Image (cartoon, helix red, strand yellow):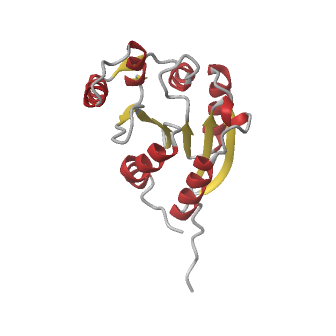
Amino acid sequence: HHVRVLRMKPSAAILSVGNEVLRGSVVNTNAAFLGRELSNLGFEVASHGVCADSQESIRYRLGEFLRRVDLVIVMGGLGPTPDDVTREGIAAYFQVPLVFSAQQFSRLKKVYKKFGKKIPPLVKREAYYPENAKPLINRFGIALGFSVEVGAKLMVVLPGVPSELENMYFDVVLPAVKKKYPGLSK
């Protein structure tokens, strides 16, 4: 008779960054969406977290999640305003600098040009990502997503705008996750 091999499901955690989520002025539909999608994909969704727009909280929660799960999806805090510190928090966690994506910046300029506007200096921030990350091009909005391979683990960082997050999930995240975890099955 056969020996049944017990396959462990890979585990995932979802981290939402944003004071407005903490305060409840924004309902976290993103976490519900990702929880559903990742479960359907064959992940054990082990944790949902929400943290403040502060580098310190981001670093702390990231460390906690990366120790415990295979896949971490972080969302929010990638906008151009000073309270958007997800990029900086993640770069600080990995102790790497932020680097500039010329490709993303020229995409941003095109978006603004299309609306007949000059690009505000502040928006340049949205073309930066941590040096150890791979940019994930956002064809649906302005903020650049990115992913970081941490040994056998993967961290994906997405903008918090629900339509952008959902579109990017199907566009760039799903293929990357399937490639990283080829053994996924329900």
Q: Quadrant of the C terminus?
A: bottom right
Q: On screen, 158 above or below 124?
A: below
In the picture, residue 100 is in which quadrant? top left
Horizontally, residue 105 falls left or right of residue 42, namely left
* Residue ID at (68%, 25%): 57
Instruction: Name the residue nearer the viewer: 31 or 81.
Output: 81
Instruction: Name the residue nearer the viewer: 152 or 89.
Output: 89
Q: Quadrant of the N terminus?
A: bottom right
Q: How many marks?
A: 0
Instruction: Name the residue nearer the viewer: 69 or 124.
Output: 124
Residue that sits furthest to the top in the current view: 121
- Which percent across, then down, holds residue 123? 40, 20
In the picture, residue 113 is in which quadrant? top left
* Residue ID at (64%, 31%): 18
Horizontally, residue 120 falls left or right of residue 165, namely left
* Residue ID at (54%, 56%): 38
Horizontally, residue 16 falls left or right of residue 163, namely right
In the picture, residue 86 is in which quadrant? top right
- Which percent across, then down, holds residue 23? 74, 34
Residue that sits furthest to the front in the current view: 116
Residue that sits furthest to the right in the current view: 23
Q: On screen, 83 above or below 161?
A: above
* Residue ID at (61%, 49%): 29
- Which percent across, then down, holds residue 105? 30, 23
- Which percent across, then down, holds residue 90? 54, 25
